[in-house]
Each structure stands twice: as C-alpha cells, then as structure tokens.
Amino acid sequence: MSLTAPSFSIGIEEEYLLVDRKTRNLVSEPPAALIEKCQLLLEHRVSPEFLRTQIEVNTEVCSSIAEARSDLSYLRKVVSNVAEEHGLAPIAASTHPFARWQEQKHTDRERYNVLRQDMQVVAQRLLICGMHVHVGIEDNECRIDTLNQIPYFLPHLLALSTSSPFWEGTETGLMSYRLCVYDELPRTGLPEHFESFGEYKRTIALMIEAGLLEDATRLWWDARPSLRFPTVEMRATDICTRIEDAICCAALYRCLCRMLYRLRVDNQRWRIYPALLINENRWRAQRYGTREGLVDFGRGKIVPWDELIGEILTLLREDAEYFNCVAEVEHARTIIANGTSAHRQLHAYHEALKDNATHEEALVRIVDLLIEETVADLEPITGP
C-alpha cells in the first residue's frame, strides 16, 4: 500500500439558474453575449450547462479552503455582474420556486443532444442545479477505498446543503426535491462498491463496450472517481445559496477524505454499511434536511443534529487543523442553528402569506431572497 499522502487539493463546481429581474422567472434563452462575456472574463472556469437557463462555474485547483472561497466568490461576482448588464441575475438554488421545465430549452451541443435523445423526458425535466466538490487523491487504490467508505457521510452533507423545497410552484414537503428529479436518471444514487481500481476499470470498460456508456462521466452517482482528474468527486449536495454554507460543506468533505486516509495508513477503515441503511439516511436528509436527525447505525437509533454535528466535528478536528479550516467546518453549527437555504425559502414564503401576499407573490419573494443571498458576503473584485 502506498503511504504517499494525497495532495487533497480541492476544486468546487457550481451550477446557477438565470432569472429575469422583472418577472423573477427563468429566462429560457439568455443572450449569447452573456455567456460570451463570462467566458472572456473567466475563460475555462465557466461554461453552458444542459439547459440554456443554467450556467456552470468551476474554481481552479486550490490548495486551501481560503483560496477556494476567494475563487468561488470571484466567480459568483463576475457572473452576477455580467448577468445584471442584461437585466438578469444568477440564483444559487437547486430548484426555482415556480418555473416549469416544459418551458426550458436545452443547449445545442452534441453531448447534450445525445443526452436529451437517450433520456427523453427524464432529461428534459432536469431543471435542477448542484454543487460538486473534487478532492485530489492521486493513488488509484486509495481513491477507490475512499469511494467505498465516503457514502456513510453523504447524507450528512446533503442535509447541510438543502435548497430545493419548491417545484413548479408547489411546496413539496421535502427540503431537497432536486433528488426526486435527479434520481429518475439511471446510474444515480450511492456509488457502487469496488474491491479494487482494476475492478472499477473493468466494469466501466464492459459498459462502454456494450454501448451503455460513452465514458465514465455518464455515472451520476453521489460520489465518483473523476474521469478527467485524480479526484473523488462529491455530487450529493444541493447548491448552497450562501457562499459560507458552500465552503463549509466543501471543507467538511475534504476533511472527511483525509480522515479516511488516516484510517488507511493505520490499517483501519470506516465500517461499510449496507446501501439499504445509508439510503434511509439519504431519504431523511432529502425529506427533513436538518429538521430531524439521522440514524447512527452503531447505536441503532436516530440521533439529533446538534449531537451529530458535534461528533463529526470532533472526529475531524485534527484534519480541520491540518487544513487550517476549523472556522469553516465549525460553521456547520451555524447552519444547524439558523437553517439552510430551504429553511429560509420556506420562511420567506409563509411570512409573505401572513402578510396577505398571494401564492404567486410569495413565490416571487423567494426569488428575491435567492438573488440577494447568492451574492451576499462575496469578496470585492479588485484589480483593473
């Protein structure tokens, strides 16, 4: 077993929805000049997504959480500034409160055209956004070992990130409705378990040879080995509306990866529980967010969130100190106390109704909240 420590480099990808500032609805055909200017300013760090109303950004490969935060802040600010020139605004939320997927148009690229043709209405309904976090783990076997153990913690990260309680004007009763839409795709959910990197490669090769996949990017699991980079990519979370929440989830994931590596060095590992059990916690995170606790399988009972987060932060203290991100991971306590974006959207909606707003007016108020929070607390753009 290689004892060369991974780099644990970190990169963050976010997907935004573009809304019209007047109607607060999504813009199904944003002007070409918007994405062109974003690409002029941000180059490879910005790209169109499957739907034209979406735009994706990705940070550079970062060596620290502070660097990742600064880069992500810059990306959000640039996209917001350019969108504003066209009367638009990005929102960092995994669903729009009232937009309809039937009114959206997909981006005319070969990859997306194939996806739409193959998946039909399942792909057309993908009016959802997420946050993906890459952590650099260069050793192939260590990467698969991390992939096998990380699923236990993915429901915890999902619960801390929820931002999709509404769908097409309906209060869904879920804190992350995004997963209901996403899980209609094949090859989603918890990752498969592999005994080795060789088994993983053979499995993917078989699926490609059989014509089931173009490549490994068609695996849309909650975590996966990246095809392009030597990373384990976490895809379980909603996109966090507030940047501090996003950085907290990213920092926690990075620390979890290092904690699992520490166990590996000591010839130990996190216990691998059946997917049946982990999926129960995944559902609880999707349904309740941080309103209700998750199951501690070792104790065989539901544990409240204030206790859960305390245990996780204690477990990761050494790693947070190593990465100099204690404050960032401790922000999870603030999320538990004050709620996620989903909590704030629901609060804004019901407060508007109490103020005698109509259902439609209350939904508009949510969009205003999302526009504001997406760019709140961003670092100012400096330089020429």
Image: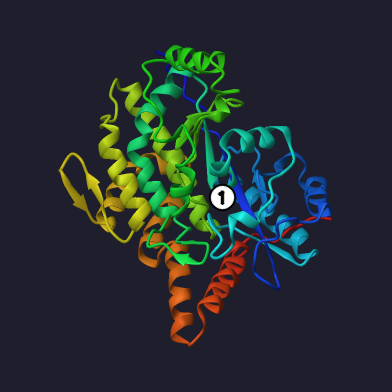
Q: Residues within 10 Å of mark 1 (few under 14, many from 20)?
A: many
Q: Nearer the viewer, residue 84 or 66?
A: 84
Residue at point 29% right, 39% down?
Answer: 278
Q: Is residue 321 visible?
A: no
Name, please, the residue furthest toward the bottom.
356
The image shows residue 305, relative to residue 367, as above or below, that is above
The image shows residue 288, relative to residue 213, as above or below, that is below
Q: Is residue 317 visible?
A: yes
Q: Is residue 43 left or right of residue 256?
A: right
Residue 212's image quarter? top right
Q: Quadrant of the C terminus?
A: bottom right
- SS at mark 1? loop
Q: Quadrant of the N terminus?
A: top left
Residue 118 image position (x, y, % from top left) = 59, 33
Amino acid type assigned to the residue bearing label 1 in the image? Cys
Residue 133 image position (x, y, % from top left) = 53, 40
The total of numbered circles placed on residues is 1
Q: Is residue 18 left or right of residue 321?
A: right
Q: Is residue 371 left or right of residue 150?
A: right
Residue 304's image quarter? bottom left
Q: Nearer the viewer, residue 92 or 335?
A: 92
The image shows residue 36, relative to residue 10, as above or below, that is below
Residue 46 image position (x, y, % from top left) = 71, 44
Q: Pointer 1: what residue? A: 129
Residue at point 30% right, 46% down?
Answer: 281
The image shows residue 8, relative to residue 293, as above or below, that is above
Residue 193 image position (x, y, % from top left) = 36, 24
Q: Is residue 292 left or right of residue 338?
A: left
Residue at point 61% right, 49% down?
Answer: 15
Q: How is the image coloured?
A: rainbow
Residue at point 27% right, 36% down?
Answer: 276
